[in-house]
Image: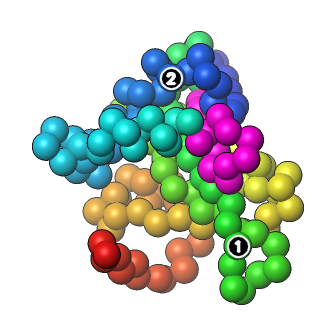
Amino acid sequence: MPAAIRVRPVEQADLAAWTPLWDGYNAFYGRAGPTALSPAITAVTWQRFLDPHEPVFALVAELSGRLVGLTHYLFHRSTTRIEPTCYLQDLFTVPDVRGQGVGRALILGVYAAARAAGVREVYWQTHETNAAGRLLYDKVAKYAGYIVYEQEV
């Protein structure tokens, strides 16, 4: 029988194990080497997870005592709802455990956190080339058909 996946909120003691997951996530999206995020962004992001006044949260997945995945999400207001909504911003699992339910467990963990906060909608985006991720996402959510635009200002 496979080991149980444990999803839980990130803790201060997780920093050393969270950092390679964060680096792997960023590398997947081309933020590595000369295009890597500033260490200041990583430091502030980490601090936000541990600040009870911030609306930004992190969950990690453990498998056999090892951190093997992360997800970061935030609650925000919307012009189409009275209650806040939840944006699942980041999701990553280490390559050697993909296909074992870690990503699904992390998404379900965000769903549970959203429900506990009185939030009724969770949404996210991914790159169109993320075929493996989209196979999972199609099983746990519905594709809404939106196209995302962005511009640095």
Residue at 29%, 52% (x, y): give it: 29
The image position of residue 54, as x and y in percent, is: 67, 49
| Residue 18 within the segment the image draws in magenta | no
Q: Quadrant of residue 77?
A: bottom right
Q: Secondary structure at mark 2?
A: helix
Which amino acid type is marked by label 2? Leu
Residue 134, placed above or below residue 30: below
Is 109 displayed left or right of 91 in the figure? right
Which amino acid type is marked by label 1? Arg
Residue 87 in view of the camera = yes
Q: Provide the residue designation for mark 1.
A: 77
The image position of residue 46, as x and y in percent, is: 52, 36
- Relative to the observer, which residue lies in front, 138 or 69? 69
The image position of residue 78, as x and y in percent, is: 69, 78
Q: Quadrant of residue 61?
A: top right
The residue range painted magenta reads: 48-61
Q: Provide the residue designation for mark 2.
A: 15
